[in-house]
Amino acid sequence: MVRPAPVEAPAPPAARRRTEFHALRVSGVERLCEDAVAVSFDVPPELADEFAFRPGQSLTLRRRVDGREERRSYSICAPRGAALRIGVRHVVGGLFSSWLVHEVRPGDEVEVLPPTGGFTPDLTAHERHVCIAAGSGITPVLSIAASVLRETDATVTLLYGNRRSGTVMFADELADLKDRYPSRLELVHVLSREPRESELFTGRLDAAKIRALLSTVVDAGAVDQWWLCGPFGMVTDARDVLRDSGVTGERIHQELFYVEDAPPEPAHHEEPAIDGPTSEVTVVLDGRSTPMTLPRDVPVLDAAQRVRPDLPFACKGGVCGTCRAKVTCGEVRMRRNFALEDSELDQGFVLTCQSLPTTDEVTIDFDA
């Protein structure tokens, strides 16, 4: 069957192109430790509003490798208003991280999407924050901690887990932050492969260690906001310990930088043959509404990219949240979710890379 071409509503003149990549010049590459760097970008004046970020947000980067498009999402590691900068740790065999850590130099150009993400604090509230991070999970947490300390009267406790002292990212910046706010920032390093002065600060940040730290270092009942960022096991352990301690879900914010069984996937834009049940799905992005017929056994993002290749995505593993959108009509079923909070789910937001249509008609709004 030959299907008619979709009819698209024209985009309003003021529609924001948050799905448009821009070539940004690398202004600096700073070695943080033996396997990690901070990459800074120059943002031209005409893109300043587009790349204004909130603490805790991330950037999606794009490059082509052997003729294939690759995208990865990296957290911004600077306080609000500072120069745009991301933290990158080398992953063995990682096409993107190897390139950024070992090859990219100042003056190079990198394709970058404007900032996205809701792992962000309220900078108008003077609250008590506790951050639990491991490894490169420190990148958004550094942005959050530096911003709330500078712009509010907040207090922050940071529990930061690493293998050894030589693998601690942003060690000098964290020490400087502690010197600048000695009474408002409590910094606790926990090392798994290097003995510390106390057994409490030696070992992995698993459920038992987090429970011990909370009973000694932190009064959970006095904390307003919890920020969890790191590998899947650490984040879920911390979340479970907090919930067992009576912390309500709306005060727990989480972000993963890696899920063991969900490596990043390349984009596939080929035209698939539709065989089986379908739904009439309307995608709204940058003010344009595009109706299309999509299969019910393929995630909305993958299926819709054949018509709208400009849809935002990065990991396609349900981790980064780049493909977040709101279901305004109909229903979908999400296979997995490691990025959205309960409050976002209650409002109808989904990860389109994990969403299967379940009703005859569905509307997905990326602009919501």
Image: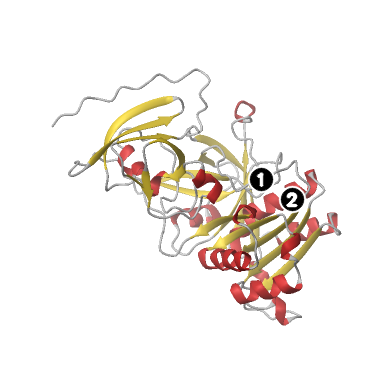
Quadrant, the N terminus: top left
In the rendered image, residue 143, in percent from the top left (x then y), is placed at 68, 50
The reply to whether discs 1 and 2 touch (Cβ–Cβ < 8 Å) is yes
Residue 264 is left or right of residue 29, and the answer is left
- The residue located at (71%, 82%) in the rendering is 199
Residue 253 vs residue 14, the one in the foreground: 253
Q: In the shown orientation, is residue 275 left or right of residue 15?
A: left
What crowding class fits label 1: few (fewer than 14 Cα within 10 Å), some (14-19), or many (20 or more)?
many
Q: Secondary structure at mark 1?
A: loop
**Residue found at x 66% / y 79%:** 194
Q: In front: 86, or 248?
A: 248
Task: Name the spot of residue 290 as percent of width and height, x first.
Answer: 35, 28
Query: Residue 65, can we see it?
Result: no
Q: Is residue 196 visible?
A: yes
Asked if residue 309 is positioned above or below residue 171 in the image, the reply reads: above
SS at mark 2?
helix
The residue carrying mark 1 is: 55
Inspect the image, locate mark 2, and give the three-letter code of the amino acid beneath it: Ala
Percent x, y of residue 300: 34, 42
Tell me which label, 1 or 2, sits earlier in the chain.
1
Left or right of 203 in this view: 274? left
| Residue bearing the label numbered 2 | 146
Snapshot quadrant of residue 275 = top left
Specify few, some or many for label 2: CA neighbours under 10 Å numbering under 14, 14-19, or 20 or more: many
Closer to us: 90 or 113: 113
Quarter holding residue 221:
bottom right
User: Which of the labelled discs sits on residue 78, or is there none?
Assistant: none
Residue type at mark 1 is Pro
> x%, y% of residue 159?
69, 65
- How far apart are the alpha carbons under marks 1 and 2? 9 Å
